[in-house]
Amino acid sequence: MEKGRVAALDAGRALAIVGVVAVHLSFQFPNLPGAVTLVARMGQYGVQLFFVISAITIFMTLEMDHARCADARHVTLRFYIKRFFRIAPMYYAAIAVYGLISYGAMRSGIERAWILGAHGPMDILLNMVFLHALSPTAINNVVPGGWSIGVEMLFYMIAPLLFFLAMNRVRLLLATVLLLGLSLAALSMNDCNGTLDCNVANNTFSYFWPPVQGPCFIVGMWAWYAFRSHLLGASDVTKRVTWLYLSLAVGFGFMTAALGVWLDKAHALAPVFAACSAVAFLLFVCARHTRKHRDAAHDVPRARVIRRCAAALGRESYGIYLWHFICVYMTFHFFDRTFGEKSGESSLALFGATLIAVLVVSYALSRVSDRLIQGRATRLSRRLLASVDRRFHLTRDA
C-alpha cells in the first residue's frame, strides 16, 4: 500500500477500464475472430470489477476515518464530502459536454452515435442529484455509461450505515439478507417469470438498474471483511493459495461468460458471478504483488513498465471511463465502414491499434480534466474536510 492506494486495486481498475473500452470498440469490428469477439464482449463485466473495487475502497477508507474521527456523524459527513467531490464535478462536466455534442449532432444532421437517447429536463435533474439509476429514460441517456455512476452513488448513500452495522456481524448479515431480498423481490415483481433468464435483456434498464447490479457491492463488502489482510498485502499467502485464487477467478469468469455472453442467458445472474470472479482476481493480484515485492531484487524492467502503465490507467480510470465514449464515437463515425470491410487478421490488428489509441487519448483527456476540474474540486473538498474536522474535534474536546 503506497500513499493511501493499494497497487493491486489500481491494477484491477486498469483491467476494468481496458475491458470496458474494448467491448465498446468491438461492435465496430464485425470480422474479428470469434474467440476475440467473445473475450472483448466479456469486457462489459469490467463495470462489476469497478463495483467490487469501489466497495472494498469505501470500507477501507471508512475504517481509516473511524480510527481518527470523533463519532459516527463525523465519519459519515467526511465520507459524503469525499465521495461527492470525487464523483460529481467530473460527472457534471460530462453532462454538459455530451449534451453539447448531442445538440451539435442534431443541428448538423448527423443521426448516428453522436446523438444521446431521448431525455428531458427532469432526466438531467435526476442525473445531477444521482437518482437517474431509478429512471428508464435518465439512467443512460444523459451521459453514456452514466448508469454505473448512478448505481454506485446509490450504494454510497447506504455505505456508512452498512459500515456501522458491520461492527456487529449478526446485524451486518441481517442487513445483507434484507438487501438481497429486496433485490430479488424487485426482480420478481418486474422481470422474472420463474426462469433463470428473468426477461432481463443485456444493456437495458432492467439490466442496468440497482436490483441487478447492487449485489455486486455486497460481494465486494464481504470480500473486504473476509480477506482484509490479503487485500492489504499483510498476509503471507503460499504459491498454492495464489494459484487457487486464479483458478477461482477463471472458473467464475467462465460461468459469467456462459450466462451473459456465450449463451446470452441469465443476465440477472451474470453480474454476481462477475463480481465473484473480480474478488478472486483481486486476491490473486494482491498475492502476486506481495510475493513480487518480497522478491523485488529479481524484478525485470518489462514488469516494472507494465505495473507503471497499469497504475497510471488505474489512477485515471474514472476520467477514462467518462471520456472514452468521445473517442469511440469518433472512430465509429469516421471509420465504421473501413473497419467493417477488413478481414479477420486485419480487423484484429486494427482493433488492437485502435484500442491502444483510444486508451491513450482518453487518458490524456482525463489528465486535462483532472487539472481543470478534479484538482480544484479536490482542493475545495480538503478545505471543507478540514473545517469539519475542526468542528467535530472541538465538539469532542468540549
Image: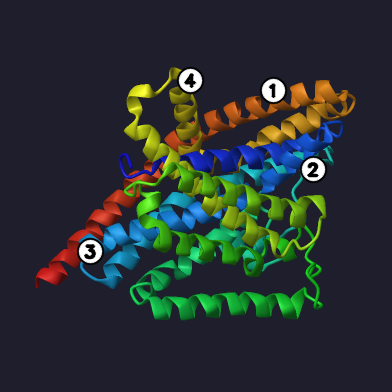
- In depth, the one of 375 and 172 nearer the eye is 172
Find out whether the residues at labels 3 and 1 contact each other: C-beta distance under 8 Å.
Answer: no
Most extreme residue toward the front, as rendered? Answer: 240
Query: Where does label 3 land, which residue?
Result: 69
> Is residue 10 at least partly visible in the picture?
yes
**Could you say which quadrant of the image residue 119 lies in?**
bottom right
Note whether 138 is above or below 43 in the view shown: below
Lower sequence index among marks 3 and 4: 3
Residue on which the image places disc 4: 302
Q: Which residue is mark 1?
A: 353
Viewer-nearest residue: 106 or 356: 356
Residue picked out by circle 2: 106
State which mark lies toward you, 3 or 1. Answer: 1
- Marks 2 and 4, the one that precedes in the sequence: 2
Which residue type does callout 4 highlight? Answer: Arg
Tag 2–tag 4 contact (CB < 8 Å) = no
Quadrant, the C terminus: bottom left
Quick check: 212 above or below 292? below
Q: Quadrant of the N terminus?
A: top left
User: Residue at image x 36%, y 43%?
Assistant: 5
The Cα–Cα distance between marks 2 and 4, rounded to whole angstroms, is 47 Å
Q: CA distance from mark 3 to mark 2?
A: 51 Å
Which is more N-terminal, label 2 or label 3? Answer: 3
CB under 8 Å between discs 4 and 1: no
Query: Dot 4 surroundings within 10 Å: few (below 14), some, or many (20 or more)?
Result: few
- Of mark 3 and mark 1, the one earlier in the sequence is 3
In the picture, measured across the screen, residue 236 lies left or right of residue 241, that is left
| Depicted 161 relative to depicted 140: above or below | below
Q: Which mark is residue 173?
A: none
Q: Residues within 10 Å of mark 3 (few under 14, many from 20)?
A: some
